[in-house]
């Protein structure tokens, strides 16, 4: 049976993808926790004895940093949700099937973007 004729990945292949996803998920959750800690962590530096101008500049930088961390945390959370959805597709044996064409997404693409739901042709057409 050639790669073109296959309608789904084998259980062995799905297990391989699951291992990749679980590894990425573990790292993504650790990164997310780190970002959350950055956001909730309050500065322990005492600025009471510095000039008011410096204090305002420092607070502005801290706010910007928190906003940036917040955006990164949101992106990370979305990535985690996509990875978790991919695990559900593995359990349902629908993983790796393009949701537009119904064809198998190439293994090479899934190894790089394990939460992909579109084949590269559809993805490129979406950009046009």
Image (cartoon, rainbow, N blue to C red):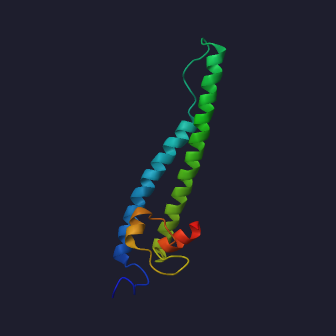
- Residue at left 46%, top 77%? 93
- Residue at left 40%, top 74%? 106
Q: Answer above or below: position of 23 versus 62.
A: below
Query: Quadrant of the image for the C terminus?
Result: bottom right
Q: Answer above or below: position of 55 versus 14.
A: above
Q: Answer above or below: position of 35 versus 95.
A: above
Residue 61 in percent (x, y) is at: 60, 29
- Residue at left 54%, top 59%? 81
Residue 77 in percent (x, y) is at: 55, 53
Query: Quadrant of the image for the N terminus?
Result: bottom left
Q: Answer above or below: position of 107 versus 113.
A: below
Residue 96 in percent (x, y) is at: 45, 74
Please name whichever residue, 10 or 114, is drawn nearer the observer in this view of the structure: 114
| Residue 27 relative to residue 56: left or right | left
Number of marks? 0
- Residue at left 55%, top 42%? 36
């Amino acid at each position: 049976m050639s790669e073109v004729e296959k309608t789904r990945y084998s259980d062995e292949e799905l297990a391989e993808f699951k291992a990749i996803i679980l590894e990425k998920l573990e790292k993504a959750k650790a990164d997310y926790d780190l970002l959350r800690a950055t956001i909730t962590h309050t500065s322990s530096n005492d600025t009471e004895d510095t000039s008011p101008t410096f204090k305002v500049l420092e607070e502005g930088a801290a706010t910007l940093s928190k906003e940036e961390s917040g955006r990164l945390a949101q992106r990370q959370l979305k990535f985690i949700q996509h990875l978790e959805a991919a695990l559900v597709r593995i359990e349902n044996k629908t993983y790796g099937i393009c949701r537009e064409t119904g064809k198998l997404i190439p293994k090479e693409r899934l190894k790089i973007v394990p939460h992909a739901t579109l084949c590269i042709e559809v993805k490129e057409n979406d950009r046009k």
